[in-house]
Image (cartoon, rainbow, N blue to C red):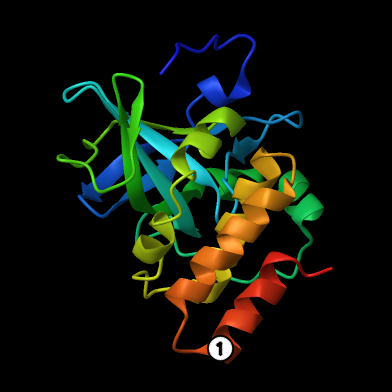
Amino acid sequence: MPARDAKKDKAAQPVGEVMSSSITGLVAEARQHQGVDGLPETLKPSFGSFLRAYSSEHKLDIVSVVYDVITGPQDSNHKPSALGLTREQLKVEQPQIFALLRTEIHACTIGYFEAGIYYPHLPPHPAQVHDFVFQLLPAEICAATTNLDFLRLLSGVSTVPVDELIAATIRKSSQARGDQYTFLVEAGQALSYLFRDDYDRLLAVLRKVRPK
């Protein structure tokens, strides 16, 4: 995988840091930076987007798909409560509350890059705690989704509606290719095999892939 220029490429900036991991997935804490208003601003990857966690110990870029983003208190002693104020009012009257929140990124592993080659299966090692997490570039997304077998790995996610996740991931993959029609046809064929025993479910997912 080629090196990235952090000054020119926003994707070279980490969006999170691994807090826990396994062979099948990871949980990362989203990074914060100072927004234009001087308050903390959290980098939140979108549902179904692609991430890579670079493991310097094993020289792997582990690729995963975001299936949940959860924001809550830093600890049990600082639980948020309803204040009846708009977000803009909170920024003026109680800006400190935003520093008390943390955002977790939950992602499902679908493959990995090693020495510039992509392998469309689970890695031999999980991401390491405190490894940084980055967003994939379009070319990297294309490499990671050429083999559509990753959809079967996503079908094992049980904490969110998996049909929504599969459709969102296909949309992201299609966008990385400039919405190429041939990719959508191939994705449709992969879905027809995955859901070959449930025609109604297949149609529902296809409608989510191309809602227009």
Q: Is residue 160 visible?
A: no
Q: Is residue 121 left or right of residue 125?
A: right
User: Can residue 155 be seen here?
Assistant: yes
Q: Residue 185 location, x and y as percent?
A: 65, 59
Front position in the image: 147 or 54 = 147
The quarter of the displayed image where residue 44 is located: top right
**Amino acid at circle 1:** Tyr
Q: Position of residue 61 (x, y in %)?
A: 33, 30
Mark 1 Cα within 10 Å, few/some/many (few <14, many 20+)? few
Q: Nearer the viewer, residue 13 or 183?
A: 183
Q: Nearer the viewer, residue 106 or 95?
A: 106
Numbered-mark total:
1
Looking at the image, residue 95 sits to the left or right of residue 75; the answer is: right
Residue 6 in which image quadrant: top right
Residue, x 61% and y 17% (percent of image)? 9
Relative to 108, residue 196 above or below: below
Residue 139, image x and y in percent? 57, 29
In the image, is residue 58 above or below residue 30?
above
The quarter in which the N terminus is drawn is top left
Q: Residue at x 64, y 82 (%)?
A: 204
Residue furthest right in the image: 212
Q: Secondary structure at mark 1?
A: helix
- Give the residue at x 21% y 35%: 128
Report which residue position mark 1 lands on. Answer: 199
Quarter of the image where one finds residue 211: bottom right
Q: Is residue 124 left or right of residue 147?
A: left
Look at 43% across and 61% down and name the residue there: 151
* Quadrant location of the C terminus in the rendered image: bottom right
* Side of 194 relative to 33 (left or right): left
